[in-house]
Structure formats: C-alpha cells, structure tokens
Amino acid sequence: MKRLLSVILPLIFIFLASQFKQEYNLRSVLQARTGKLWTAWFSKSDSASPFASPYALIKDTKEQVLQYLNNTNLFTAESLSWQLPFTGDTTAEVIVPFRINMQGTQLAAKEVQSKDVKPATMPIVVKQIVSPQVKAMDFELYEKAITVVNNKQGLLPFRSLDTLSFASLTIGEAKGNTFQEYLDKYTTFQHFAIARKDTSSSAYESLLTKLADYKVVVIGLHGLNTSASQAYGIPQSTRTFLERLRSKTTVALVVFGTPYSLKYFDRIDHLLCAYEDTEVTQTLIPQVLFGAVSATGRLPVTVSQALPAGTGETTQTLKRLGYTVPERLGMHTPTLQRIDKIVEACIKDSVMPGAQVLVAKNGKVIYEKAYGYLTYDKKEQVTKKTIYDLASVTKVAATLQAVMALQAKGMLNVKAKIADYLPELKGTNKEHIVIQDLLLHQAGLLAFQDHWTRTKVESEFDTTYYSYELDEMHPLVVATGLYGVATLKDSLWNWTIQSRLMKKPQRQKSYAYRYSDIGFDILQQLVERQTNMSLDAYVDKYFYHSLGLDELTFNPLKKFKESYIAPTELDNRFRGKLVRGTVHDQEAALMGGVAGHAGLFGNANDLAVLMQMNLQKGYYGGKRYFPDNTIPTFTKTYQPKNRRGLGWDRPEPDGGGGVSDLASRNSFGHTGFTGTCVWIDPDQELVYIFLSNRVYPNAENNKLARYKVREKIQSVVYESMSTPKTLVADVKGNKPETN
C-alpha cells in the first residue's frame, strides 16, 4: 500500500465497456496517437490517493479525474505502457502511451521505475479503437487543460461583439482550418494565413498594415516542435512580427504546442496555451475566447521568470453556445446517425435538394451537418454556411423578438388595442383588435393576402408600381431585375387596413384560431412606429449584431454573393423567374424583402444562437436581452382551444402540431413554408434547427410535410437521449450499470 500509484487515464475511463464487446475473441488494444497530451496524477502517499486501487474503473472516475486535473504533471512520452485488466464479458489489454514532463522516453521509464511500476510489454496492436466516448473524454481533458496565461484587463472572454472588429491569422497552417471555422461561429472574422512560419519579412510587413485596421487580432501559432535549440520551430521573423503587431492593435495569441515556447511571448497581453495542435484544441480555443467554456488550466512547468509553474487565469462563461460531442451530454452518436439516413433518403426522393440540421443540448451544439446540394443538378453543395430563406420563422426570429423587447421596455402592452398605437385603424373593422389576439392568431384576420395581383395588368407588370432599373424612385427589390416604387409599401398598408375579416358567429365573443400572416405585418407597423426604425434595422441593431449573427439578415444579396444563398421557387405566377437571394413570399417581396411575416434569411448556427438566447430566458454572451419573465409569458398558452403562445407555436395538448410527439408540452418554436423549423424544449434544454429549400423548384412539392420529415428527425434527437449508457466494469468484475 505504501507504493500505491494512482494513475489517471482520462481518455479511456468511460468507454471501454462499450468498445470491448463479446465478439472480440482476440485481445483488443487501445493505441493513442503519437504525441498526444495525456494527464496523470501520481499520489504522494496512501492518504492522498483518490482511488482504492490504481486499476479500479468505476463510474465516479470521471469526476475524480476532473477533481485532480489541476494538480497534474504532464506526461508526454510515447513508448511507456501499462497492462490494465478490464473485466466483465471479456478481458482486454490496453496500451496507454505517455511522455513524462516532456523529457523523453528514457527519463520517462526511469521516473516510473522509481515508483516501482515497470512498463508492461505488449504485443503488436491488434485493433485501433476510436469511439465517441474517447472523443468525449478528449474534449473534457483539453477543456480543463487549456490555459489563459495572460489576460490584461480581463478582456477575455470577448463580450461586446458589436463594438469590436475581428481578424484572425494562422501562422504555420493554411487558411480555413478548424480554428478559423469555429471563430466564425461567434462573430464576423476576416481571416488571414501564413502557411510557413519562416516567411519573408516583406510578407509580414504587408500583413502588419492590414491587421492594424482591426480592433482585435486572434492569432493561432501552429506547427511547433519540442526542440529548444530550434526555438521550438518559431523563427525570429515570426517573433518580431508578433511583437510589432501587439504595439499596433490588441492581439490574442494562441500557442498550439509546447508551453516552453511561451517564453518568447510573455509580454503579449492576451496569451493562451493549448499544449497540442489537434482538431479538438482548435475547436475548444474559440469557445474559451468567447466564453462558451471557462478556462481553468495552469502552466505545469516554469516557462520564464514572468511565467512560473502554476500561472494561469480562470475565465468566466458567458453562456454562449459551445460545441462538443453528444456523449458529453449523455446522448448517443450511433442513434443520431440515423438522421443521416432520413435526410439522405429524402434527398434521393426529391423531398428537398439539401438541408442543414443542428441540435444543441445544455448549451452545447452536439450535432451540426449540411446535406446535399442547393439544386437537384448537384452543382453546388450545401455547407454549414449556406443561407436559407426562413419564411415564417421570420415571425419568431425577427418580429416577435422586437415585440417582446418593446413589451419588456414598457413601449407596448399586449393587452391593449392595436389602434391605440396605430390610430389609422380607428374607425375600421380592425379598431378593436387586441395585440394579444394578433399574437395568438385569433384576431379574425385572413390567412394571407395576394396583393401582388393588383400590381399586374393581365400578365404584365404595371409601370405604376415597377421598374426594371433600381433608382431612388424604385428602391424596393422585388426580384433581381425588378424593383418596386417607394410608395408601394404605403399602398400595401392601405390595402391591409381595408381587408375584410372572417365572419364571427353571433354568440361567439372572440374569433377562433386561424393562422394568419397579416397579423404579423400589422405588428411590423407597430414595431416600426414605436421605434422609429425599420424592422430589419431594429433587430439587427439590438439583437443580431450584438449576438454576432452576421448571416441572419433580410435582403442577403446586400451582404453576400448569390452563390451563398439557396434558391427557392421558379415563380411562374408572379415574377416569372427563379427566386434566389430575394424573399420567396410574394407579399414580403412587394415590401422590399422586409415583412413581419417573412423575409429573414439565415443558417442553422445563427438561428441556434438566437434560439439559445430565448431558451436562456433572454440572457446570452454576458448580456440580458429580456427580463426573466418575458419568454415564459410569451410561450405559455392562453386559450383552451388554441395551442399557440404569444407568437410562438406549441405542440397540441395530445401531441402533434408539426412537432415530434416526444417533445415536451412546454416546448415552443415555429416552422416555415420553405421547409424550415426552429424548436426549443426548455424541459430538455434542447434547441433543434432544420433548414431546407423544399420549395425548389416548385412550392407544390409537399413531401416534407406529408412524410413528417422534420418531426421524424426531431424524434431521433429525443431517442438519442434515452439510449442506455454503458459504464465501465470495475476491476473486481462487477458488470456495468445501465440506465
């Protein structure tokens, strides 16, 4: 017992029972990547040992690993191995490579031998095992190890995104790597790269001028080695460049390699060490920079007089979305992979040419994929950055956000009549409509309006309303090459005021529920009148910009190339052309692309951020957008025969309503005509996003709704949370528990 050695092996404790199955008759062997960072803890005495046995693998191991992780030595040798017995249905042997204190294999062996633990000899690797559970522990290990070395004035994590401009530079790796991809998920970045660290001084000089224009430059230093005599692979030109750049703008430098290299950068105000250059560390560092996860790591070695062992700052979380693997949240990757089969089968059956699917659980995106193509000719692939026409998701992602904000600020009262704010409605059939009834879709309004028919003479566009040239008199983009007169919006509003209502039975006090676009166009008028801003300008200023949502926008062609945007319908009824980059909805097109019921475009990630803010009752990124009670007020039901909340859709009490039967009755969201869906389940802390252009090339294609594709995918998400979890058997042979 005096020589008891406690060894933490973070990447294998949770997954072995699920990997070493009975059908493996040969010995199964785990072989880790060469050079991977491992963390272990040697107990100094029996009383300090966190385990009853160094080989006992019990379900509490994970917590014990994390508890002791900050008091660790870094093990970094490649050849050291232990033979660990795992009992249960089968016995397996596992190779666990280490490098101790970055001092090489011989010293590593000597250090272990001094603890009376000799490396076991192992046969040739029989099977290399990579599993979701391994990746889950990989994420946890690195998340705890990442160290914020310097953080002057507490700038990290970045907070006020709307006041900062960002650029990123990768040195030693090509542009568009995982690091830059995940930076983009938090705000708009301009990306630069120097593939080789030993570049010419003239190239650095050119970069210096460009980068100085940004308020913050995030730099990733890649391709380091462990040789001190070679300055760890960092040439003098790179060090000089970084020193000069920090005098011109705010620099956040991330070292993806040995901590000993930090001695060259201890004067940089915002300095982070990732220890290793892997896909996981490149995924996690942006999350630390933007407050999705906190940094708690400490330097394990003394780097310089200014950076002794133990240096490190703990950063706070700002409750921004993080990105991880499903198993960290108790979900099951093989179950989620059934989504692939559903979507791929739908693409094959021409339900839609492509799609994006995103799932976030407990504030972490655990599933995000892009499928198929923008059209059926398969020329342009869907990416995670593809921008879709969101159709009626606009109602909750734009108009409702503004209405909730104004209600919270006391600038409107949903119990009041709409005519109290829009006096032109007095004396009309709409003067007694209450705002709450507009939000509940029970104000007696028609479902939609086809006002575009008033703007054509037979099959020709009426020149009273249209021009084929964009100019001051015709600023409204109805379609590419077709522009509406500025007064067209006033005409539409007058036609809306004059529109008839549904008939109400004599003995019925209020109108029955009937879904209507018109109510949200009236709400748009209310928002714009109260704020003296257009709807798109208001939500961009007070929501999207500060949330970092550059791709959530009206009229995307003003900001993005057409190739970034999925086409919708070949509109033979009205515009006579394929609609791409302008809103599919004809009424919204007449309004110049900005309507209360449609017009918003975006991708799955940006929508997930906005929906996560709503899930968190109005708090996100260190900022409160609504008081705590606003979201619950707007998401509850108000009428027994109306499943709707205020603006939000909800499940039917007995299930259904365009949502999976497995979704909780407290869940809320909205769908869109073009083939879109956002859904929030506060009971499960779940956000589900589905985007497609199912209306391409013909909106009469209703297979998406008929096959209940969105609901089936959502059901798979819930099923992935109920999959039994297998825990590792302990050394005594007790069988794994399931729940």
Image (spheres, helix red, strand yellow):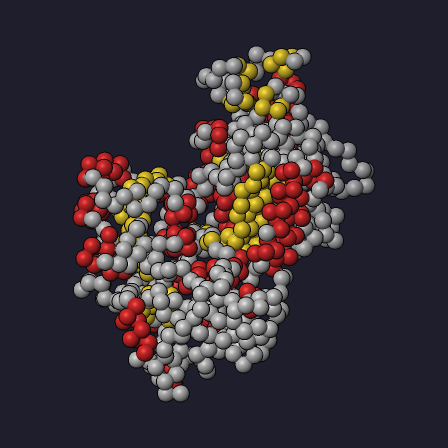
Residue closest to the far bottom: 1
Viewed as shown, does residue 630 lie left or right of 189? Answer: right
Q: Is residue 131 visible?
A: yes
In percent of width and height, residue 719 lies at: 64, 57
| Front-most of residues 487 and 137 | 137
Which quarter shows the C terminus? Answer: bottom right
In percent of width and height, residue 111 lies at: 30, 75
| Front-most of residues 28 and 484 | 28
In percent of width and height, residue 695 lies at: 63, 32
Viewed as shown, does residue 345 lie left or right of 564? Answer: right
Residue at left offset 60%, top offset 59% = 721
Residue 410, placed above or below residue 61: above
Which quarter shows the N terminus? Answer: bottom left
Residue at left offset 58%, top offset 59% = 332
Residue 472, placed above or below residue 178: above
Residue at left offset 58%, top offset 68% = 25
Residue at left offset 36%, top offset 79% = 117
Q: Is residue 183 visible?
A: no
All told, the count of numbered labels is: 0
In percent of width and height, residue 377 lies at: 58, 29
Residue closest to the far front: 124
Viewed as shown, does residue 226 lie left or right of 96? Answer: left
